[in-house]
Amino acid sequence: MHKIGIFGNTGLVSKEIQKILAHDDKVNIVFRQNSKRKKGNLAKCDLAIVATHEEQSLEIVPEALKQGVRVIDTSGAFRLKNPEYYKNIMA
């Protein structure tokens, strides 16, 4: 069983991801977090899916990696070599 965590779990992208994962009996969503709520323990996840804005991803992804969790980030925060670009451009 793959234990999955989802950040931004009430947004459109993460809702679609959750619909897809609901059909896989080898997946269990054990962690969910949005801007208002957090449920579960990220450290128990094998994989975290981060479906947040770039600014939030820049904080979430390094923390998840420190906890030994693999990450898929749907934002553009890490697509460029210098993630500071997003902070400057999006400010």
Image (tube, rainbow, N blue to C red):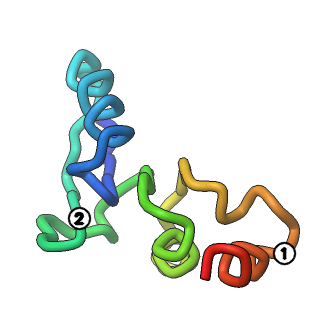
Q: Which mark is residue 18?
A: none
Give how far across and how far down residue 19 sits, in percent.
24, 25
Instruction: Work out whether 87 lies above or below 80.
Output: below
Give how far across and how far down residue 67 sits, in percent.
46, 76
Query: How many numbered circles are shown?
Result: 2
* Residue found at x 42% / y 52%: 51
Q: Are marks 2 and 1 in contact (CB under 8 Å)?
A: no
Q: Quadrant of residue 87?
A: bottom right
Find the distance from the CA under tag 2 to the CA under tag 1.
Answer: 26 Å
Query: Is 17 left, or right, of 84 in this rendering?
Result: left
Q: Tag 1: residue type?
A: Asn
| SS assignment at label 2 | strand
Q: Which mark is residue 82?
A: 1
Give how far across and how far down residue 47 sits, in percent.
44, 51
Earlier residue among tags 2 and 1: 2
Give how far across and how far down residue 83 sits, in percent.
75, 74
Residue at the top extreme, as displayed: 23
The one nearer the camera, 54 or 71, is 54
Query: Is 67 left, or right, of 9 in this rendering?
Result: right
Graded by Cα atoms within 10 Å as few (under 14), some (14 to 19) or many (20 or more), the crowding at tag 2 reads some
Please state which of the two labelled residues, at mark 2 or mark 1, is closer to the viewer.
1
Query: Is 24 left, or right, of 52 in this rendering?
Result: left
The one nearer the camera, 64 or 26, is 64
Question: Which residue position holds label 2?
Answer: 33
Instruction: Work out whether 61 lies above or below 66.
Output: above
The one nearer the camera, 33 or 84, is 84
The one nearer the camera, 18 or 1, is 18
Q: Tag 2: residue type?
A: Gln
* Residue found at x 56% / y 67%: 54
* Residue found at x 14% / y 73%: 36
